[in-house]
Amino acid sequence: SGQTFEVFTLFPDAVAGFLRGGLVGKAVARELVSVHCTDYREFATDRYRTVDDAPYGGGPGMVMKIEPVVAALEHVTALRGPMHRILLTPAGPRFDQRVAERLAALPRIGLLCGRYEGIDDRVREHFVDECLSLGDFVLNGGEVAALAIIEAVARLREGVLGNPESAARDSFSLQDMSSGTGPEDHEAWLEHPHFTRPPEFRGLGVPEVLLAGDHADVARWRREQVWRRTWALRPDLRPQRTLPAEAPLYLVA
Ligand code: SAM
């Protein structure tokens, strides 16, 4: 049984167009995932289809009105059933791989995209289950955030990726990198680097071990790379530990 995303937006065609391509498009074609886009504007009540208005208290910009947003939510809920409602906002907790894993278990997810200065705050307080931010920067709208979340969540669903092992090894997935003698130790890591043909490009080679064809050596090298890269590039993933400087890191686990 597939997972459904309900995207609420003023730009349904742009969102739907993007999702037709790539792995999500294939997952939709194979009915592993479905995505519906709903235009707030269709739920505006006046003859000009107004979805925004000036902010109470004055100041620049416009605010998305509560009535079309709630009407769109309630219409889709009545039509296709309840969903876990997520408001995209820079003020929310940051989306990451742990959140993606949690969301991947849900059957129906609603993603509410704001525009202008954002949506009337009563929506956040009373009509959604959680808020999420893509990061500490401001986009013009929630659509890019919704698309990022759909991609990150859908690829964790069974059958969406060709090889299920690939998601398990991806960066930020929880892996046991302990030595195998102690307790298991599931933490987030960066993946090892990848190379493909040709073996030399403008004098640039690839690591010998990958060409030699010894699977155990390759596994050992990759494991070391996971350690090194995580510590070198993302020390914040291991704040509680210190990096053993230049030792063969796979021995230090
Ligand atoms: N005035 C708002 C503020 O300063 O927090 C920013 C509004 S932004 C221009 C318009 C919409 O883009 C927001 O309602 C939200 O849906 C979306 N958006 C902007 N930045 C985002 C982010 N980092 N994560 C998720 N959504 C974002």
Image (spheres, rainbow, N blue to C red):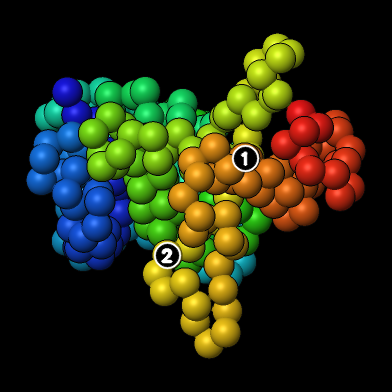
Q: Is residue 248 left or right of residue 15?
A: right
- Kindly indicate the quadrant of the structure image that contains residue 157: top left
* Residue 112 in the image, given as x and y percentages of width and height: 38, 44
Q: Does the rendering let one see residue 234?
A: no
- Vertically, is 107 above or below 191? above
Q: Does the rendering let one see residue 231?
A: yes
Label pair 2/1, CB-CB below 8 angstroms: no
Secondary structure at badge 1 equals helix
Q: Is residue 32 left or right of residue 8?
A: left
Q: Which residue is mark 1?
A: 220
The residue at the point 58 percent across, 61 percent down is: 208
57 and 35: which one is in front?
Answer: 35
Q: Which residue is mark 2?
A: 196
* Residue 18 in the image, given as x and y percentages of width and height: 25, 62
The residue at the point 85 percent across, 31 percent down is: 240
Amino acid on which the number 1 mark rests in the picture? Arg
- Kindly indicate the quadrant of the structure image that contains residue 93: top right
Label 2, residues with CA under 10 Å away: few <14, some 14-19, many ≥20: few
219 and 92: which one is in front?
Answer: 219
The residue at the point 63 percent across, 35 percent down is: 188
